[in-house]
Image (cartoon, rainbow, N blue to C red):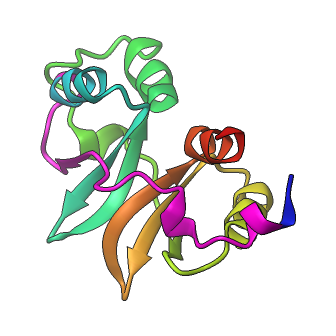
């Protein structure tokens, strides 16, 4: 991994805007949106800010394997929280360290405390290959 790439700010590799849904949206609605936008996660919003995340794994583990009805199961019931975040101007190296240390594959990206994007392993890999 080249030193110049890891010193770039997180905002150069993040997805913006991130896919979002409301706390009270159903999992079937969220799955439809994830498929439409070809993403593996959706940030869950409440009160104007992100409060959780629903990932493909959350859907498989907490809906499919649990035998729940996706059209009746709400985001708030299966989302992962709390969210781990990083400011958009921080270096990619810091994001990678945080992801490794916290054993996570996604970071919420903030600018002055406001949601601006999401950084995923996939986006990071893509940024290093291109």
Q: Is residue 18 above or below residue 83?
A: above
Pick the residue in front: 64 or 40: 40
Say whether residue 42 is magenta.
no
* Total numbered badges shown on the rendered structure: 0
Pick the residue in front: 67 or 82: 82
- Tell me if residue 84 can be seen: no
Hey, which quadrant is residue 42 in on the image? top left
- Tell me if residue 18 can be seen: yes
Question: x, y percentage for residue 33?
Answer: 21, 28
> Which quadrant, please, contains the C terminus?
top right
**Does residue 37 appear to the left or right of 92 in the view shown?**
left
**Does residue 71 appear to the left or right of 122 in the view shown?**
left
Magenta span covers which residues?
4-28
Q: Is residue 47 above or below residue 52?
A: below
Question: x, y percentage for residue 5?
Answer: 73, 61
Hey, which quadrant is residue 32 in on the image? top left
Say whether residue 21 is magenta.
yes
Q: Residue at x 86, y 52 (%)?
A: 1
Q: Residue at x 19, y 51 (%)?
A: 23
Hey, which quadrant is residue 116 in on the image? bottom left
**Does residue 87 appear to the left or right of 26 in the view shown?**
right
Pick the residue in front: 16 or 46: 16
Question: x, y percentage for residue 43?
Answer: 33, 50
Question: x, y percentage for residue 31?
Answer: 26, 23
Among all residues in the image, which is located at the extreme bottom?
112
**Does residue 11 appear to the left or right of 116 in the view shown?**
right
Q: Is residue 52 above or below residue 62?
A: below
Q: Residue at x 85, y 57 (%)?
A: 2
Q: Is residue 42 above or below residue 26?
A: below
Q: Residue at x 24, y 49 (%)?
A: 20
């Amino acid at each position: 991994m080249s030193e110049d790439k890891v010193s770039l700010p997180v905002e150069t590799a993040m997805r913006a805007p991130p896919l979002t849904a409301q706390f009270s949206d159903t999992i079937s609605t969220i799955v439809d949106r994830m498929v439409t936008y070809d993403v593996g996660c959706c940030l869950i919003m409440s009160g104007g800010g992100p409060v959780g995340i629903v990932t493909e794994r959350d859907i498989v583990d907490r809906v499919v394997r649990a035998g729940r009805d996706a059209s009746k199961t709400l985001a708030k019931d299966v989302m992962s929280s709390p969210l781990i975040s990083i400011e958009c101007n921080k270096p990619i190296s810091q994001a990678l360290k945080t992801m490794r240390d916290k054993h996570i594959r996604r970071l919420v990206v903030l600018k002055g405390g406001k949601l601006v994007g999401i950084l995923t392993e996939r986006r990071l890999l893509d940024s290093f290959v291109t």
